[in-house]
Amino acid sequence: MSLYNELLPDPLPANPLSIASGWLADAWAARDQPNPNSMVLATTSVDGRPSARVVLCKDIHADRGYLTFVSNYDSRKGEELARNSRAAVVLHWDHAHRQLRIEGLVQRAPDSESDAYFQSRPWQRRIGAWASAQSQPLPTREALFAQIEATAQRFGTPVPGPENEHDSLDVAFDIPRPPFWGGYHLWADAVELWVEGESRYHERARWTRTLTIAPAGPQPGPWSATRLQP
Ligand SMILES: Cc1cc2nc3c(=O)[nH]c(=O)nc-3n(C[C@H](O)[C@H](O)[C@H](O)COP(=O)(O)O)c2cc1C
């Protein structure tokens, strides 16, 4: 990726998420950071206190207009999203000199989608999802191991550990998805693409659209785009 040569397309394209998903694919191909799909997810409490943490972006569905991530529905972020579905994410690819900001409304993914994704995960992570009440207090680290052991016993699996951490996906155990764990869709209604420019004359463009909430899910209007000063 050459710094200073890349510019945002002119005229700006109608759908910024096409570029965004291309950037994510570029980051996967470059593999110059351990988690090219890591993103900071910001949520807020009911009284407006923001909180942010890293989660993994599983996919950007450019045509449908949302990105996906997975988490524990009872975690702090899960509780906050249940009360205020507005959220923002940032992906920063330092080597590629690119920043992607997305804002929008978060909805739980359909159960069928979460089930399918959960079953695609190695059994050790499926045990982990059951064993950890994410964001709840933990008296000692040993208490977590006790929870993991009890969960392994419940589902008839070995206790996850270094000796089996590279088990292939063919090692099958019947571990259903916990009801408190699953996917989320972040429906975008604002996207900003940022490219580092020479002498800090960065390129920025922001797209916005309306999302109308309907029983079938958010119905996006057309995007409108504008360039921004750096
Ligand atoms: C690289 C990286 C990837 C992570 N991916 C996820 C993820 O996909 N889902 C998740 O719930 N937590 C993930 N975490 C852990 C979160 O940052 C966070 O600790 C956890 O979700 C609890 O956050 P909360 O208490 O604000 O809900 C990841 C952390 C890092 C550093």
Image (cartoon, grey):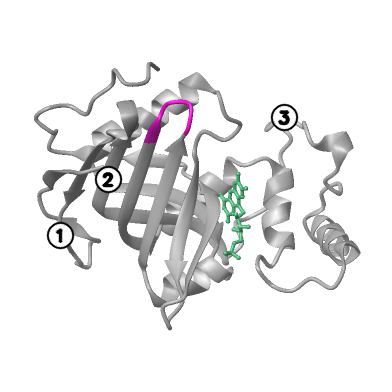
Q: In this view, does 156 lie above or below 9?
A: below
Name the residue: 31% across, 56% down. 103
Disc sitting over residue 117 in the figure:
none
Q: Which quadrant holds the N terminus?
A: top left
Q: Where is residue 221 in the image (x, y as percent from the top left)?
A: 11, 54
Name the residue: 21% across, 29% down. 8
Q: Name the residue under label 1.
A: 210
**The residue stretch that appears in magenta:** 94-98
Q: Mark 2 points at which residue?
A: 192
Q: In this rendering, which labeled residue sits more in front, label 3 or label 2?
A: 2
Q: Which circle's residue, 2 or 1, is located before the other in the chain?
A: 2
* Three-letter code for the amino acid on which mark 1 is drawn: Thr
Give the crowd class for mark 1: few <14, some 14-19, many >=20 residues within 10 Å.
Answer: some
Apparent side of residue 188 relative to residue 2 in the rendered image (left or right): left
Q: Do the residues labelled 1 and 3 touch (CB within 8 Å)?
A: no
Q: Quadrant of ligand 1?
A: bottom right
Distance between the Cα atoms at labels 2 and 1? 15 Å
Q: Which of 147 and 25 is in front in this view?
A: 25
Q: Is mark 3 on a helix, strand or loop?
A: loop
Disc sitting over residue 168 in the figure:
3
Distance between the Cα atoms at labels 1 and 3? 44 Å
Asked if residue 92 shows in the view, the reply is: yes
Q: Which of 107 and 38 is in front in this view?
A: 38
Name the residue: 90% across, 63% down. 142
* Three-letter code for the amino acid on which mark 3 is drawn: Ser
Q: Which of 217 and 85 is in front in this view?
A: 85
Q: What element carries label 2?
A: strand
* Residue positioned most to the bottom: 47
Q: Quadrant of residue 218?
A: bottom left
Asked if residue 197 shows in the view, the reply is: no
* Three-letter code for the amino acid on which mark 2 is drawn: Glu
